[in-house]
Image (cartoon, rainbow, N blue to C red):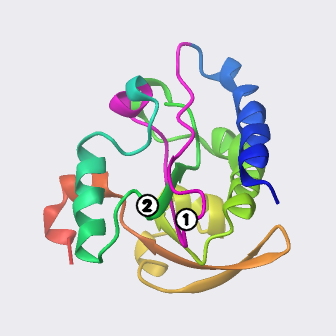
Amino acid sequence: MDKDRELSKLKKSILKLKKNFPGKNLVFSDGNKDAKVMIIGEAPGRTEDKLQKPFVGRAGKLLDSLLETVNLDRSTVYITNVVNYRPDKNRKPTSKEINQFKKLLFKHIKIISPKCILLLGATAAAAVLNHIGPLSEVRGKWKSIKIVNSYFNILTTFHPAFLLRQPAQKK
């Protein structure tokens, strides 16, 4: 599979959803398309929308430092979000917005084909695992999930933005 070509096609499909997010920029991905680890967050914030790159605000700085603790950095992982446009008023994406992006996210996962996926927060867990309920039910537990005819090892943890609001949860 030609990942560059497939990612370009995927980006064009995601651009078609821009009409639902007027005045917002596409925040597609960052990192190594051949990474063994794929990180999936919720949706871009204000800084990410402005710079068109995921996890570049305060939560991104925390993510970078957390990656360093396990000898990883942005050049060795691939980062994207469930929703690739910033929702109005910096709110969580609605279930309708998540559903608009879900098939595209699964295509994204299939193209990258990482060895493992790290889901950051409840929105990512809901989109990928269909988990509705407390994040504590899936946090820190490995799951093998079938996505587009392939199995992926998935781990869920807190979103860095949550950890900034609740620093005691950093364990």
> What amino acid does circle 1 point to?
Ala
Q: Which residue does the image show at 19% across and 60% down from the upper left?
A: 166
Q: Is residue 43 magenta?
A: yes
- Mark 2 belongs to which amino acid? Gly
Which of the two residues, 125 or 134, is positioned nearer the viewer here? 125
Side of 126 relative to 74 (left or right): right
Quarter where residue 124 is shown: bottom right
Whole-percent x, y for residue 85 in the image: 55, 32
The image quadrant of residue 2 is: bottom right
Within 10 Å of disc 2 (Cα), the crowding (few <14, some 14-19, many 20+) is: many
Using the image, determine if residue 169 lies above or below residue 79.
below
**Residue occupied by mark 2:** 121
- Separation of marks 1 and 2 at Cα, in angstroms: 6 Å
Task: For residue 40, say whether it is visible.
Answer: no
**Quadrant occupied by the C terminus:** bottom left
Who's the residue at 64% across and 45% down the image?
98
Secondary structure under the numbered disc 1 in the rendered image:
helix
Q: Secondary structure at mark 2?
A: loop
Q: Which residues are magenta?
A: 23-49
Neighbours of disc 1 within 10 Å: few (<14), some (14-19), many (20+): many
Task: Spot the residue most to the left.
Answer: 168
In the rendered view, does 148 fall on the left or right side of 67? Answer: right
**In the image: residue 77, left or right of residue 132:** left
Q: Which residue is drawn at the image coordinates 83% and 67% (left, top)?
A: 148
Q: Nearer the viewer, residue 43 or 28?
A: 28
Locate the N terminus by quadrant: bottom right
Q: Which mark is residue 125?
A: 1
* Residue at the extreme right of the image, as rendered: 149
Quarter-of-image position of residue 72 = bottom left
Q: Is residue 46 left or right of residue 102?
A: left
